[in-house]
Amino acid sequence: MSSEKLEIVQTEYQAGRVAFESGRYGQAIQSLETATGLVDRNSRLGGEVQMWLVTAYEASGDTERAIELCRKLTRHPRQETRQQAKRLLFILEAPKLTIPDEWTVKIPDLAALDENQSISFQANPKADIKYAKPKLVAPEPVDLSQVNTKDNQFIWVALIATIIIFCSLVWLS
């Protein structure tokens, strides 16, 4: 691979990683696909680029493409890449758990914003906030006639065992 081509691959790879880490998955996919097309897919760098591409596909919601590429990577020449791909494939193919809506927090979609726009989130001071008051529940009284109050001699057994242990420690020292 020529140094000029390697430089383009490195640039696209880094651009894809930066875009992915900042949440711009579409741009990350575009950069990583460009880098994948230019790099030797069987090399160490090719495996890294493709693993990042799998995660970008998954993050953008294209799970089928992520699984398809990850399956290909399980046959990669480098053992480290194969192992990572197998672990990631296990996660991608795992059954999806459903989470009730009341357990989640809705995050606004900021994808439509330009880089120069901003949104300010402010609390509404006039909002009617209602707090639930905790209900205090008194414990039910215990009927002492139902409680076993028979002496089981435990205190004497524990006291004798303690004396024996203490005496043996004194004797051994």
Image (spheres, rainbow, N blue to C red):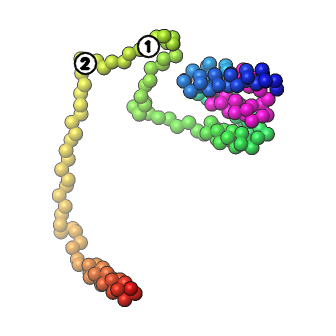
Name the residue carrying label 2: 125
Q: Is residue 146 visible?
A: yes
Taking the magenta stretch, the answer to whether it contains residue 100 is no
Q: State the SS at label 2.
A: loop
Question: Splitting the image into 4 quarters, where does residue 135 fall?
Answer: top left
Question: Splitting the image into 4 quarters, where does residue 50 fall?
Answer: top right
Mark found first going from the N terminus, 2 or 1: 1
Q: Residue at x 19, y 55 (%)?
A: 140
Q: Residue at x 62, y 19 (%)?
A: 27
Judge left or right: residue 116 versus residue 73.
left
Judge left or right: residue 125 versus residue 21.
left
Q: Residue at x 64, y 38 (%)?
A: 88
Amino acid type indicated by mark 2: Pro
* Residues at circles 2 and 1 in contact by the CB criterion of under 8 Å: no
Taking the magenta stretch, the answer to whether it contains residue 40 is yes
- Residue 118's tag is 1
Question: Splitting the image into 4 quarters, where does residue 45 fall?
Answer: top right
Amino acid type indicated by mark 1: Ser
Q: Where is residue 118 shown, x and y percent of the image?
A: 44, 13
Q: State the SS at label 1.
A: loop
Q: Which residue is the extreme one toward the front?
A: 3
Q: Where is residue 52 shown, x and y percent of the image?
A: 65, 30
Q: Which residues are magenta?
A: 34-56
The residues tagged by marks 2 and 1 sit, at their Cα atoms, a distance apart of 21 Å
- Residue 54's tag is none
Q: Where is residue 37 shown, x and y percent of the image?
A: 76, 23
Q: Nearer the viewer, residue 5 or 164?
A: 5
| Number of numbered tags placed on the structure image | 2
Q: Where is residue 54 shown, x and y percent of the image?
A: 66, 30
Q: Residue at x 23, y 78 (%)?
A: 151
Q: Nearer the viewer, mark 2 or mark 1?
A: 1
